[in-house]
Amino acid sequence: MDAAVTPTRKVLIKLDEIRTSFNETDGRLVDRPTRTKRLTDVDTLLLAGRTAYEQDKDAVGFAVFLAKWPETCPVTSAQLAGVALAADDGAALGDVWERVFGAYLRLLEQKWAELKVSDRRVRDRILASLRRCAVTVRPGADGVVRLRALTRQDQHQNESFLLLLRRVVNLLLDNGNGPAPTMLRLVPPAEPLPRDFGDTGAAIRDAKYTTNLTFVPVHERDAVQYMIMRVTTRISWPDGQPLELSGTVWPLTIPLRNGSARYELITDDNRVVRAERLGDVVDRPLPAWYPRPGSIKEGKDALQGRFALGGVGDRPPADNRPAKAWNLAELGQVASAFERIPAGDLEALKGTSLIRDKPVDPIAAGRHGGETHVSTGGLDLIGPKPAEPTPHVHYFDLAFDDMDRAACGPPGDCGPGGDWTLLHEIGHVVTMCPHEQASLALARLRDKPRQAYDLLDQRLRASLANADNRLIQAFNTWTTAYGAYTDANDDFVPVANQTWAALRETVPANVRDVIATFARAQAAAVAQAAPTLAAARTLDALLPEGQRDVVKVTTVLLLRHTYIAGLAAPGLLLARFAAYAAQVGFQSCTPYGRTSTKEFFAETYALFTSDRERLWEINWRMCAWLEDGYPAVEGYDPRIR
């Protein structure tokens, strides 16, 4: 060997030898001795690479080593494709891999800055590898040992793996934003695999694309390349416009000779399509609270109870329109997807109903997987109304059928593409349903609490005939204060509704004026609450014991301004979201999200709840803002959590 070759370069040569052996064989860990040897090899090489760099300080060579090392690692979806994992693999494979991968992350954290890597291609290779390798072999929620994504509960040296990963990602990105691909949600038409794939490579090259199948198991490569040929040569936008894949990520379920697998097709600016295996096509594990196997009624009841839903209903038949009803598989998919909803958003779901439905328009049926609304309209006006009240979400066939040909989620935690739609609609629930919840709360406040006030008012007036001046004056002060509170809130209601109307779809150019007008009306309403309650306390103190109900009745009535504010709250949330997105340079991850602020939020919400670490890499500040519960933008300081 050439004496001029540095120790780091010598380790690189050994690493390349292992990489070559991977590419020349199936590359899968089909038996335990192979698994053990490959893990031992990469573990040994990691230590050797670190030691060599400490000797020669070959920064360029070590940076290349850090990029190539995870591309050789054996615990990935591709290398465990089709491998039956047993219970003891959790220790034999999971324990060892977590130790080795954690050591690699620590090494990156310690050494990356001093390498001063300026080549973004090296950085991007590492980022791609971190996503590919952020998996372990452990039991899932159902107790079955499988390849699954690392979670916050997985620890390395008493620290959450995801916190360590996030620090490394931010280090690689110099605390900035990562590459921001366009996420494609198109669903390719169903097509059986041909008997002979033909020369798919030539067709792809004719379309001016090339492929990178390095991370695809050998036995799946023909089928994956066939899908790449289809999407690069045969598929266009619904309006007929040609589809340009540069800078896109397209999660798809790809048919194989024996089954199917979920992949991402990632196309760079040079039109190279890289296929990354996400996982096998299996149902996500059901959450522990969901009945197994259970009946349809039990599934509906479990969903309704868990999320305090208004109902889980079917669409009754009407004229030529067939009935649509939930089945067990669909209810289970909803349960698994809804388990991803952040705790802070569950309040918005309360009282919201889920309707299994189908659009009457065949064009809409082929394009929309769901619809959320907060008042009777649209589908509710066609035929008999659903049994479940608004606000509600309609879920259509597309979300459960055709969208199975798409995919959703990271390696080790992927599901059908319909999960994206299920969660997208929850994004709409968060920014729509609180408006109707507030309307219903105001209606209830006009009922018994107002009756209680009228009865109290009548009783007090009847007792004033023989009352002293102090009591009369206190009564007059209370009624005057409550009258002022009522007047201010009567003025607040139309302003709140106007704010909601102005902000519910797209943030307008005069958004600052809209918010300022709302703030003034709200401040005027809130200002009258304290004097009214103080007057109620004074009046109660002068009444005989047993008749001191003024504070009790008034306290309930003084909820009105909070409910009125709720009419505008979801629109104000959209405005905060748009303002923070602009502040941190975040744009919609999908073309559909660029059509309105409402859809921008819903598409971002779907990515956040289904593939959070990808959002972190694209724009960690936006991800942190969502995790922190949509705080006020002014003064917000995002942190790694």
Image (cartoon, helix red, strand yellow):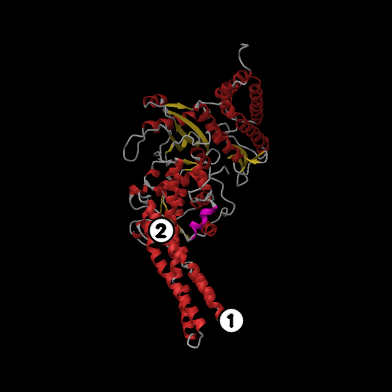
Q: Which picture quadrant has residue 157? A: top right
Asked if residue 99 lies left or right of residue 474, the reply is: right
Q: Nearer the viewer, residue 360 or 198?
A: 360
Mark on residue 186? none
Q: Which SS class for mark 1? A: loop
Q: Amino acid at mark 1?
A: Glu
Magenta span: helix, strand or loop, mainly? helix
Q: Nearer the viewer, residue 240 or 44?
A: 44
Query: Is residue 69 shown to the viewer in this render?
Result: no
Residue 33 image position (x, y, % from top left): 66, 29
Q: In this view, which residue lies farthest toward the bottom?
A: 466
Measured along the vertical axis of the image, is residue 640 above or below residue 58? below
Q: In this view, which residue lies farthest toward the top?
A: 2
Q: Residue at x 66, y 31 (%)?
A: 32
Residue 620 image position (x, y, % from top left): 51, 40
Q: Give the Cα distance between marks 1 and 2.
A: 41 Å
Measured along the vertical axis of the image, is residue 464 above or below residue 328? below
Where does the magenta region start and end?
A: 343-350
Name the image quarter holding the N terminus.
Answer: top right
